[in-house]
Image (tube, grey):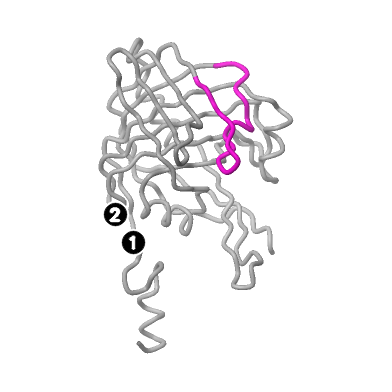
């Protein structure tokens, strides 16, 4: 393989059979279950990277079913997203993500900087209850539940929020000597959003300690609300907002 061939073909590892294809990445019938809870403000501040700032002592715990995603397949994801401020504007910072499929784990980390680790999340309806579960190996680390479709929400308002709210990530890729080669605050948009339905109901969330999946480090002090919605969207590629190594 010649040098110019490598330059033209290099996209992702391994070069002979990349773990994920080039985008765009479109998600169909993506199902979200999000529980908002109040947490310890000091513990929350400690995990938000500057120049982002804490907007309020709130965490959104997400369970997401993705049955049809271009290039990534059929998988489920779970994690914690934090409302933040950046340059005076509200946004969301993704703090932790756990999922059960390798291509979006590799692609999410390498392209955008999503903080993804392999685990075993699930999202199902059990009779009258929407249930989200997250296991790391054999250990349960999160269980969420909501009354199934008790009240309808404004789907267009949710779609508009997805379209207009900035999303932030801390992208870290190491050098061959173990130091940071890339360390950036990245933003990304959600594009071409269509919400098919949105609902809420009474909700509960339990988080459990784990040495390597520390979702419990942002403890649940009070449940503030929950929402369940189904949407199509395209995950837009990223933009560097701040370079920590510059």
Q: Is residue 161 magenta?
A: no
What residue do we see at 47% from left, 40% from top? Answer: 136
* Viewer-proximal residue among 129 and 231: 129
Q: CA distance from mark 2 to mark 1?
A: 8 Å
Q: Is residue 207 magenta?
A: yes
Residue indicated by mark 1: 22
In terms of secondary structure, where does tag 1 sit?
loop
The magenta stretch is 205-223
Q: Position of residue 181 (x, y in %)?
A: 61, 67
What residue do we see at 47% from left, 31% from top? Answer: 140
Residue 1: quarter of image: bottom left
Would residue 26 appear left or right of 78 to someone viewing this image?
Answer: left
Would residue 203 appear left or right of 221 to someone viewing this image?
Answer: left
Q: Position of residue 42 (x, y in %)?
A: 74, 30
Q: Residue furthest front?
A: 138
Q: Residue furthest right?
A: 42
Q: Are marks 2 and 1 in contact (CB under 8 Å)?
A: yes
- Give the quarter of the figure containing the C terminus: bottom right
Q: Residues within 10 Å of mark 2 (few under 14, many from 20)?
A: some
Comes first in the chain, label 2 or label 1: 1
The answer to whether 116 is drawn above or below residue 1 in the figure is above
Would residue 135 appear left or right of 233 to someone viewing this image?
Answer: right
The answer to whether 113 is drawn above or below residue 1 in the figure is above
Residue indicated by mark 2: 71
């Amino acid at each position: 393989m010649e040098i110019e061939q490598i330059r033209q073909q290099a996209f992702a590892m391994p070069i002979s059979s990349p773990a994920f294809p080039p985008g765009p990445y479109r998600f169909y019938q993506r199902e979200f279950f999000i529980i908002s809870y109040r947490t310890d403000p000091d513990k929350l501040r400690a995990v938000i990277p500057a120049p982002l700032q804490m907007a309020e002592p709130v965490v959104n715990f997400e369970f997401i079913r993705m049955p049809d995603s271009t290039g990534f397949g059929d998988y489920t994801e779970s994690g914690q997203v934090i409302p933040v401020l950046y340059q005076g504007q509200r946004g969301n910072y993704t703090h932790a993500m756990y999922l059960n499929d390798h291509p979006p784990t590799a692609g999410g980390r390498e392209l955008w900087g999503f903080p993804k680790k392999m685990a075993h999340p699930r999202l199902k309806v059990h009779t009258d209850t929407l249930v989200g579960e997250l296991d790391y190996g054999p250990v349960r680390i999160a269980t969420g539940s909501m009354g199934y479709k008790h009240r309808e929400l404004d789907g267009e308002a949710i779609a508009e929020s997805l379209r207009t709210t900035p999303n932030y990530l801390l992208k870290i890729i190491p050098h061959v000597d173990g130091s940071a080669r890339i360390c950036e605050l990245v933003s990304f948009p959600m594009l071409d959003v269509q919400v098919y339905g949105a609902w809420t109901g009474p909700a509960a969330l339990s988080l459990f300690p784990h040495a390597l999946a520390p979702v419990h480090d942002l403890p649940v002090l009070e449940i503030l609300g929950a929402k369940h919605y189904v949407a199509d969207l395209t995950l837009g590629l990223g933009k560097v907002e701040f370079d920590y190594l510059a």
